[in-house]
Image: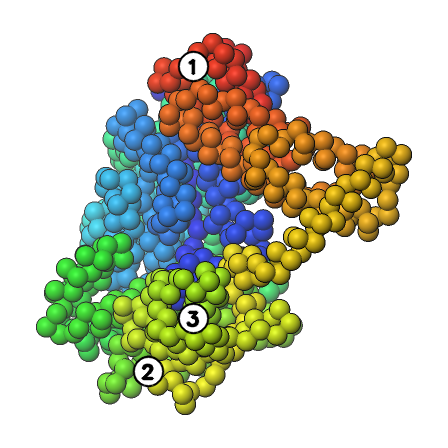
Amino acid sequence: MKYLILHGHFYQPPRENPFLGEIEKEISASPAHDWNERITNECYRPNAYSRILDGYGRITDMSNNYQYISFNFGPTLLDYIADKKPDLLKRILEADKLSMERLGYGNAIAQVYNHIILPLAKKEDMVVQIKWGLYNFEKYFKRKSKGIWLSETAINLDVVDALCDCGVKFTILSPYQAHYVKGITQTDVSGARIDTSKPYWLYGHNGKRIAVFFYDPYISNAIAFEHLLCSAEKLAERIRNAYGDRKLVNIATDGESYGHHEPFGDMCLARYFQDNIHYDNITPTNYEHYLSICPPSEEVILHEGEGKRGTSWSCSHGVERWRSNCGCGGDGVIDLSWRIGLREAFDILRNMQDKLFALFLNFTNESRNSLRDEYVRAIYNDSDAKDLYEICSKYISFKEFIFLMESYKYSLFAYTSCGWFFEDVSRIEPIKNMQYAERSFHYARMLVKDKDVPFVEEAYQEFLKALETSISNKKEHHTARYFYEKNAKIDLFTKLYIINQFIFNLIASNYKEKDINIFKHNIKATLIDKNHIEGVMTDNITSDLYFKVDTVEENYELKNNITLSEYKDCNDNLVYTMHLKDLSSDIRDKFSDSLFKDDISKLDDIMHKIYPEYKKLFKYFNTNDITPDYDYRRLMGAMDSPILRELIVSKGREAYDEVSKELKDARNAGIFISNSGISEVVGENIKNALNELYETGNGKIIFDLLSDIKFLSNNDMPIDRNTYENIFYKILLKYKGLLISFNEEEKKLFVELGYWLNFNMDNI
């Protein structure tokens, strides 16, 4: 029997603005809102619905690839998917359950919580990161994980001890981390010469041990960097040739290789699992299952790494990539000394945490560590926060407890590995880590407010000095402190941002939404007098914040003059001016129609008055084969697009013939009409109708669906095929499983609908 373990490490760092609790729009991820969304669209979702095509390019099946691969999803990514993409989470969980039914062991394993480099962490933080990752896994998968993925596979013997203490049974490492194998004799296996087809025992300082697997470096590298996923046949051949007399081929890469780094890599994987793996008589399995049939019989000793700090899969020096100018990630020519000062700054913040815990909680170190370990429950459940607080209630208030624990949490977030991985401190990853550090300091300041505790401010000043030693490689040679002051120190700006958004939302709602929640802050207007608004903001943690706002409009430019105070009387405080443009682009877009509805209405009236005359002229041009001037054609198209969209909104499908004729005439005259508004309306109808067909099985819906899809297709309008195909596939499975049925006429239409959505419906 031959076995294959193909592991995907799926991970994104925490991307939320720590003061807002939301991911802001990331322009570099366009056309998606942010990088989480973009990589979800390119990789995570495609692997849940991976297309298997016939020779004509039609869909014959969809593979849930997670059912056949070993995988981990980083907790911060899994939280995002659960919140924003619940249908995808369902497919991931289904895959794990199916693998348990097939093998007796699930494919999914846990991951260290927010991807910090464990060998560089304090020992108590190692345990926290492991336990928080295990908790996150159990929360979603409803079972305990025996294995865990280590950030960058970074490990030393202290980490081994921590893994054992947390009940972890196995992990996966790079073969380049192995130094010796101890059996009857001791063999040097440096340079990836270790046999990757079996697990080994790895012992810690305390004599406890875990099992470790080492992935095949050659196939893994070919998948990640050599475009092996361009062909299922080539992938199969490479895997087939790797066996020899061995029972196991073990591959591990970043999961993003399957679709994001390698477009359509998910389809290569799907085809391989459908066809090639059976031809080669290979059983896809996972680490826990393989351990049950082939436990370790030999011990491995790892390289110690530079300074005996440990090793990883992405730094040839050990773990220096996350603390020093080792050269990794700089192509050998870039000065990476900025990494030193950045870590020193965060170490200052982290050491301050120990002083805070010692000052506010008169516990033993063991009790303090236990509280930190358990705080993950409070991250996901407010009632658990109150239960945990009972342990501390005689020392601090509930608010102080939250300040203390959140300050600690964000000090760990500041260590997220991506902050050091790339070439410069000016990148978004180090800046995001600095934002988390600022949030940690913010909670610490709230904790010691009105108390004689100077070490928080002293630590902050040391933190700033350390940032000044971290110097960018860009020609301006700014320090990390410059980027911190510019992009991370956002506490005051956040308060102004939230109030600014509240005011514009209030105006857009015609002053109806007077008490709402924005980014976990409750905001209430207490006085509205024309363009003067007063109110209060609270987040149930910090002190109430009172505000007065005067709204001014000049030449379509809206601005809010905001005064803030911790007291109801704001008269003597500074005035801050915020504009509509200060809001993120997606929020601006949301408000624009309401804020400028009167002006838009005037333009709309003008267009409707001009439209009949324009239509006559338009008809004359078409009849006489006249192509008007380019600028005039643009103007005509801009006028026609919203009117045609309005026609569909008001008349529905009855307008399709009329709109199609208008679009055809426009094309013949060389006039461009934007399709986006029209396709958006029709596309939403299609998605809703497909979901209704899936839920109800009502075949009468199919005729309307065909009408919608034909309209978009015949008019060359964008079609969200991925979404429609995914839903239709679920309907098709229901139909094949006899869970829904159609009469003969409905069945014909259903088959036709499948063909329009590029499915092979020959045997339906």
Name the residue rendered at 27%, 82% in the picture: 449
CA distance for labels 2 and 1: 66 Å
| Distance between the alpha carbons at the discs numbered 1 and 3 | 54 Å
| Picture coordinates of residue 406, whole percent (x, y) | 29, 66
2 or 3: tag closer to the N-terminus? 3
> In the figure, 673 relative to 379: above or below?
above
Q: Earlier in the sequence, mark 1 or mark 3?
A: 3
- For this view, does 753 lie left or right of residue 287? right
Disc 3 packing (10 Å; few <14; some 14–19; many ≥20): many
Name the residue carrying label 2: 568
| Rendered image: mark on residue 214 | none
Q: Quadrant of residue 456?
A: bottom left
Packing grade of label 1 (10 A; few <14, some 14-19, many >=20) is some
Can residue 579 be seen in the rendering of this structure?
Answer: yes
Q: CA distance from mark 2 to mark 3?
A: 16 Å
Q: Quadrant of residue 614?
A: top right
Q: Secondary structure at mark 3?
A: helix
Instruction: Read off the residue under disc 1.
Output: 742
Dot label at residue 499: 3
Residue for point 39% across, 37% down: 87
The residue type indicated by label 3 comes to: Ile
Task: Residue at 62% x, 69% y: name it.
Answer: 556
Tell me the kind of residue under disc 1.
Answer: Phe
